[in-house]
Amino acid sequence: MNRAQALSFFAVSAIFCGQSDAHPLQAEPINHAYVFNFDQFNLPEDPDEHLVTGGLLLMAELNCTACHEVPKAWQERLKPKPAPDLSVVGSRLDEDTLWLMIRSPQHRKKGTQMPGLFAGEEGDDEKAEALVEYLASLKGETHKMPAGDAERGKDLYHKVGCVACHEPALDVRPPKVPADAEVEKPGNASVPIALADAYEFNALAAFLKNPLHTRPAGRMPDMRLSDQEASDLAAYLHTGRIAEKATARAALNIPKQGIEKGKALFSAMNCIACHQSGQSGHPRPIQTPTAGCLAEKQPTGTPRFDLNDLQKRALRLALSEIQKPAPKLTAQQQIDWQMSRLNCYACHDRDGKGGPEDPRAQYFGVNDPTAESLGELAHLPPNLDKVGRKLTRSWFEKILWGQNGSVRPYMDIRMPNFGQAQTEMLISAFNEADELDPPVKIDVSGLEKHHRAELGRKLLGATGLACVSCHGLKDRKSLGPPVIRLTHTVERLQPEYFKELLLNPQVTQPGTVMPPMFVGRKTADKDIESIWTYLREVEGQPLPEGLMSAADFELKPTDKPIIFRSFIEGVGTHAIGVGFPGGLNAAFDGKTSRWAIVWKGRFLDAMSNWQDRAMPPIKPLGTDVKELPVAGERVFGGYRIGKDGVPTFLYRENGQQVEDTLKPAGDHFERTIKTKGKETKEVVSW
């Protein structure tokens, strides 16, 4: 095979083998550098004043400013994103894949944003081979991942949100599409995923588990997968995989060029302007281009992005725009810019822009059928209007890059982590853009008479405003649809937004199913503040009526004794119950300073202490209640608790200080009585 034949064969050889047409790797190919939000929001018919913003987006996302110098005022907005870290790329990709990707990126991965650097000039083959040798030498330890299950991975791929950006498989029927209906295909192109087949399995699973490690720009976000889930997805993406061989490379039979030559070329060809590979270096700024990458016939040595006509027009508009003073972006414009760069609009809408297109949204499902009554709120990511005055900073951090920020457990799709470096600026921008003037006034000081948790608890309960009909709390589901649980309300929501939402839910959160319970209610301000007080103190409060059961108030000793002061039947109004692990219990009468009763089995039910102001005496829940003898005159002196949690009761009898301790010993109690210089023991049994 001669050189021309080899390159011709190479041009058609980058086809993934062994896949069924249903696999997402068989997405319709994209023949230009693909930037999702540019393609989604720009058309050839658009006027220049609209398209110029798309051109600026392309300039930033294609990393034009990694090589080209722009006016200082534009540098922050157009700063390049970090390209994939290549420091251990040799552990992910084999030499043939590296050669195919280096020699012609658009052939190996249709739609890639990586430009081609070779145009068939003399010496290109040797340079490509040298780069392959160098990159293949960059290896590291690969974490061993569990074996994956392709069917589980297929299910996961179509549930957790992968299809918001990537191609859904044709053989997966969305949950709500009837069996006899044709599944609608996405109208927008999908982010290319074609290199996944080339990754070594453990490397692919490790990448899916923590993509930000390899791709710190966050354009492939962390989907919060477990090791097993990452392996299952990797197994699905490797379904039918046949490792592709670079036949053209073998035919050319280029002799070894040496790792050092490849390392030098990596720097000389300015690959280090975008990629991290263990080398240190900086971009080489050059004059702003007027042709170069945008020319119909590109000069030798210029990167080839395979731009389409619309992209070239947009970039030319952007090049003219950056010769003007850079406008100061409003907070909302900053949000729109960063959401466009990160493709947040693939899932979320804000101010009427974005949200998943219907053919992708149809895959977003629920894991709780009772949530279906919520409509789109059950399965679609939330609208981001007013979110800046809605969420506290700590909850923003949980959602964006932390842990445990989800409050919609009925929803299959997950909120990805794009990395703190990419999303932290959004918090202050959201706060500024969504500020309400004048703000809603709410008193959360806790100092007013109506700031009582019990009042708020009653309002939430079944015989109050019946909020528990929709909202669960702690570990309890609601009585009806599984709307957001209220457990973390105070930690999650700003109090002003909480009141704004309750006073006018449909205006504050369009589409919500929350009824306007407080419209026209004269006590609305006080009631809302009482509810806030309860939710702030919820950890130490009983559940509202409707969510609460008698079992919630049963005191159950586990590791250490429970000491509970109350009115106890057979003891009196000064009773101190002591429940021991193992099923022996006793109660001390603080009025007469004596052990009054002992019993076996269950300890006490504290419900009446919470629910009834009169606090009628509570009965021991166990069996074999035994009354102990009445003692003489004593003066109670309190009690102290030992390291083991066992109380020792103190009193004076006949002028002497007494220490009285009861401890389980098998199926009976052992009582120890200490007076000055004397200790006696006795057995208390049934």
Image (cartoon, rainbow, N blue to C red):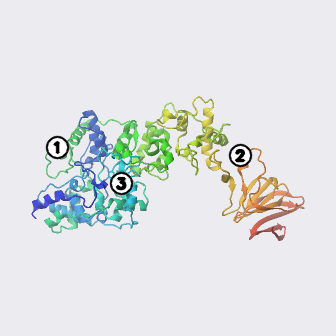
Q: Residues within 10 Å of mark 3 (few under 14, many from 20)?
A: many
Q: Position of residue 139 (x, y in %)?
A: 31, 66
Helix, strand or loop at mark 1:
loop
Q: Amino acid at mark 1?
A: Ala
Helix, strand or loop at mark 3:
loop
- Labels 2 & 3 near each other (Cβ < 8 A): no
> Which residue does the numbered mark 1 point to in the structure image?
291
> Toward the viewer: 282 or 372?
372
Q: CA distance from mark 2 to mark 3?
A: 54 Å
> Which residue does the numbered mark 2 point to in the structure image?
611
Q: Amino acid at mark 3?
A: Pro
Q: Residues within 10 Å of mark 2 (few under 14, many from 20)?
A: few
> Which residue does the numbered mark 3 point to in the structure image?
216
Q: Position of residue 597 (x, y in %)?
A: 81, 60
Q: CA distance from mark 1 to mark 3?
A: 31 Å
Give the tally of numbered discs. Answer: 3
Q: Amino acid at mark 2?
A: Gln
Q: Position of residue 165 (x, y in %)?
A: 34, 49
Residue appearing at x 65%, y 50% in the figure: 549
Q: Residues within 10 Å of mark 1 (few under 14, many from 20)?
A: few
Q: What label does residue 569 carry, if any?
A: none
Q: Nearer the viewer, mark 2 or mark 1?
A: 2
Residue appearing at x 23%, y 42% in the figure: 311
Quadrant hosting residue 469? top right
Q: Nearer the viewer, mark 2 or mark 3?
A: 2
